[in-house]
Image (spheres, grey):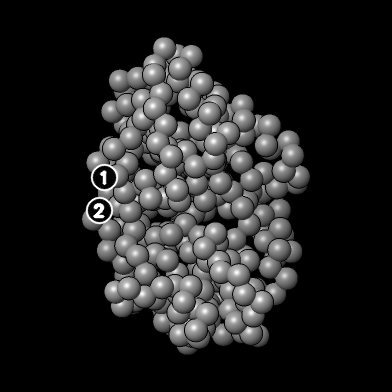
Amino acid sequence: MKIVLGRDDLAAAAEAGVRASGTRPERFDVRPVHRASRGFVNENAVDICELAIVTLLQAVAYGKPVVLLPITTLGRHQHQTLVTLGELSTDAVEGSTVGVRSWSQTTGVWVRGFLTEQYGVDLRKADWIVYEDGHVDGHRDPEWVRRAPEGASLQQDFLEGRLDFGIMGNELPADDRIRTAVPNAHDAAQQWALARGFAPVNHVVGVSEATAREQPAAVLAAYDALRAVTVAQQKASGPVDFAPAGFAALRGPVTQAAAYAYEQGVLPRPVDFDELVERTCAALGVSPARLGG
């Protein structure tokens, strides 16, 4: 069974679970891990793969044979990822140029959701520039989003002043001039998460639908092993759970991400959380309760 998980502890747990079920695991070390998403979603290149939640939602919306294994591999606050050079803030987003790696990048979906919901921003009144396509074949960005010239770099354009704002998580460059556009971003993020009862989820675990149907015991063993690791992480996470596991725990963040994504033209149709649950359970031949729901 071919596995791609970015964190070494999670990859080791999944391998051990699969091996204990009598199936031989084979880990592929792909960094950054999002580079494995395209092959997984469009070609079933691996069996179990970490992928961004919006990529999973798009895959389902476009009919790709992928199901959700309800494990969070990356959850974090997101308000701090909207950055600028100098003193601009969210009230200046309309009429400004904003860069993001791709329109379907999950971090961007969360941030744009906050901008509309909390700060009253009309997204169509900003000049949005993207630098990459998404991972799911068939998706096209909205007409009001434009593509940067070939060879352009989000980080370079931002640092050299061709962008007023950038949305950047792990790719954020080191520069003392960089400021968060949301005032007191950490406090704002914490308040949002506490009010909602969940933190934004970035990455989850996807499984090839064919693999789920053909090797359900190995997939369920991987789930159990991964859940054990994430439950231990939850205990140290404080008041906000950054590693929800199981359908019940993931319902809130995934539902919210799906709503934001549809509103922003990232999804061609609404994707209901229960659709994800039903697809997974049908493929594995289990009830939702078996997977924390």
The residue that disc 1 covers is: 42
Residue 67: x percent and y percent? 37, 36
Q: Can residue 214 be seen in this view?
A: yes
The quarter in which the N terminus is drawn is top left
The quarter in which the C terminus is drawn is top right
Q: Which residue does the image show at 70% across and 47% down from the upper left?
A: 240
Residue 192: x percent and y percent? 67, 59
Q: Which quadrant of the figure has residue 245?
A: top right
Q: In the picture shown, does residue 139 fall above or below 203?
A: below
Q: Are marks 1 and 2 in contact (CB under 8 Å)?
A: yes
The residue that disc 2 covers is: 137
Q: In the picture shown, does residue 145 fall above or below 34?
A: below
Give 69 or 177, whichever is nearer the viewer: 177
Side of 23 where 240 appears, left or right: right
Secondary element at image label 1? helix
Q: Which quadrant of the figure has residue 143?
A: bottom left
